[in-house]
Image: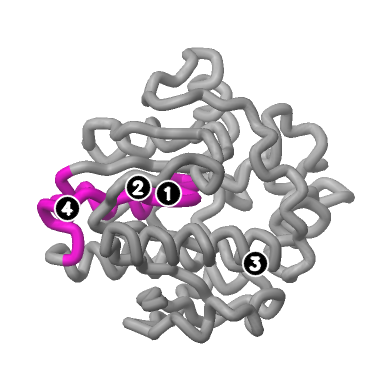
Amino acid sequence: MASSIGWKCTGFLKAVTSGSFFLSTWGQFPRRGMGSVLDPAMRAYLEENTEVTSSGSLTPEIRLRLLTPRCKFWWERADLWPHGDPYWAIYWPGGQALSRYLLDNPDVVKGKSVLDLGSGCGATAIAAQMSGALRILANDIDPGMAITLNCELNHLSPFPILTKNMLNLKQDQWDLVVVGDMLYDEALADSLHGWLRKCVRTFGTQVLIGDPGRSPCSGHSIWRELHKVVEYSLPEATRQQNSGLTTSAVWDFQP
């Protein structure tokens, strides 16, 4: 075991789960545009340094390539990972709740267009496709590295991935927007709040937010417009990886 245990105690995971992370890198990662082609060298690197797992989450039906305690970079110094902080390699509690809800309630997405905003590992978009969504776009400013691999793991055709900051783009019409684990920074919550409100008021979009209720944004005004749909007890492995969080919920945004 490394003397500095990298991601888990000194890197991005501690910062986000403790609520101290500030989104200073928003919009600064390389942008791959729309598509699902993964460079062969990158594919090989991800396959070597992540683990395929379906355990320890709310959705054992979904197989994902993640950063786990059995991976070198879980323990290694964060600055040795060469591709930017891999937020996409963690299955965050809010995303787990959203994915579980869509799998259990396919009518929410069946035949509909779905935008997965802040898609990360792509699990919620994958759950939407499994549940019969007609059109899906996964959006994340991280390069979307593992989403294509995760689609393959679940025998699904890859869906489009957009790695631009959608909060800076002209809005499109979606039946449903899903947002997982993005209410951890006041400035980001402000931007999301305005953007999502416009979606609802302009297009009548339904917005579902998956969030465990981290303290940094617990007093933000967006919470006055969130209505709890369902709450899940998190598996023990997820609790341990998220500073003891015990539950995560799905919220309906009604501005």
- Which mark lies nearer to you, 1 or 4? 4
Mark earlier in primary sequence (1, 4)? 1
Residue in the picture at 27% in, 56% down: 61
Q: Which three-letter amino acid code belongs to the residue tagged 4?
A: Lys
- Image: magenta residue range: 108-134
- Which mark lies nearer to you, 4 or 3? 4
The one nearer the camera, 155 or 84, is: 84
Most extreme residue toward the top is 40
Residue 236 is at least partly visible in this image: yes
Residue in the picture at 79% in, 32% down: 80
Q: Which three-letter amino acid code belongs to the residue tagged 2?
A: Arg
- Which mark lies nearer to you, 4 or 2? 4
- Which mark lies nearer to you, 1 or 3? 3
Q: Residue 182 lies in magenta, yes or no? A: no
Q: Above or below — where is 58 with respect to 65?
A: below
Q: CA distance from mark 4 to mark 3?
A: 28 Å
In the rendered image, residue 69, in percent from the top left (x then y), is placed at: 63, 52
Residue occupied by mark 1: 53
